[in-house]
Amino acid sequence: MRIAAIVPAAGSGERLGASLPKALVAVSGHSLICRAVETVAQYVDLIVVAAPHGYEKPISVAVEKWSMKTSVITGGITRRESVSLALATLPDDVDYVLVHDAARCFTPGSVFLEVIHGLKAGNEAVVPLLGMVDTIKRIDQNKFVVRTEDRNFLGRVQTPQGFSLATLRAAHARECSVEATDDSMMVEEMGIPVLTVLGHDLSRKITTSADLEWAEAYVARRIK
């Protein structure tokens, strides 16, 4: 049974206030992509990193320690394009694929294990999810509240998102009725059940300067 991982890493660092692509932004001396691949490599047989155009070399250098199981390709303009390009490079003997954001580089190994366990149990799609703690309001185009949603049936989806290879390929081969923000959304449109497992607060997506400050503080506490 072979498991592959796709790590989309083509996002810009604009919202972080960085001149480099987000994946190359460092937290306490180590880039986000380095930290992400370090964890991913413990749970999969091969990894494909989708790098921003023109940054393939520095991304390759950042993940050189895991080069025996990691390849770096040029990503697309969108996340979906990057994942599709990476999918095309995977051999047919791969059983499962984990799609993991480079920006969620502190995701604990326990989340990877839960997702993999869900796949091995026979599910075609598995995603980590955290429940909502805030009251959730639906609003209209004029910013007025329409109603309050039942947060017991809502959650925040994280990564790694796991799929059978055939399911993920089929999802990327078809048109999506809306702009998909993650891969599970495309699988949902096919009518395939998506199992949720417990996510983790440490799987925070490093997107803004505030997230970066949190990451620096987290690493500082961890190494004391």
Image (cartoon, rainbow, N blue to C red):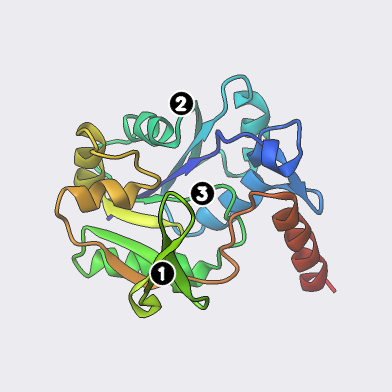
Name above or below for residue 10 compared with residue 146.
above
Disc 2 residue type? Gly
Residue at (60, 55) in percent of width and height = 105
Residue 113 in percent (x, y) is at 42, 69
The numbered mark at residue 76 is: 2
Q: Of the two numbered discs 2 and 3 on the same chain, state the one appearing first in sequence.
A: 2
Q: Of the two numbered discs 2 and 1 on the same chain, state the one appearing first in sequence.
A: 2
Residue at (57, 27) in percent of width and height = 52
> Badge 1 local density, few (<14 within 10 Å), some, or many (20+)?
some
Is residue 134 toward the left or the right of residue 212 in the image? Answer: left
Residue 75 in percent (x, y) is at 48, 28
Q: Which residue is mark 1?
A: 155
Name above or below for residue 96 compared with residue 68.
below
Quadrant holding the N terminus: bottom left
The numbered mark at residue 101 is: 3
Q: Secondary structure at mark 2?
A: loop
Marks 2/3 in contact by CB < 8 Å: the verdict is no
Residue 183 in percent (x, y) is at 34, 47
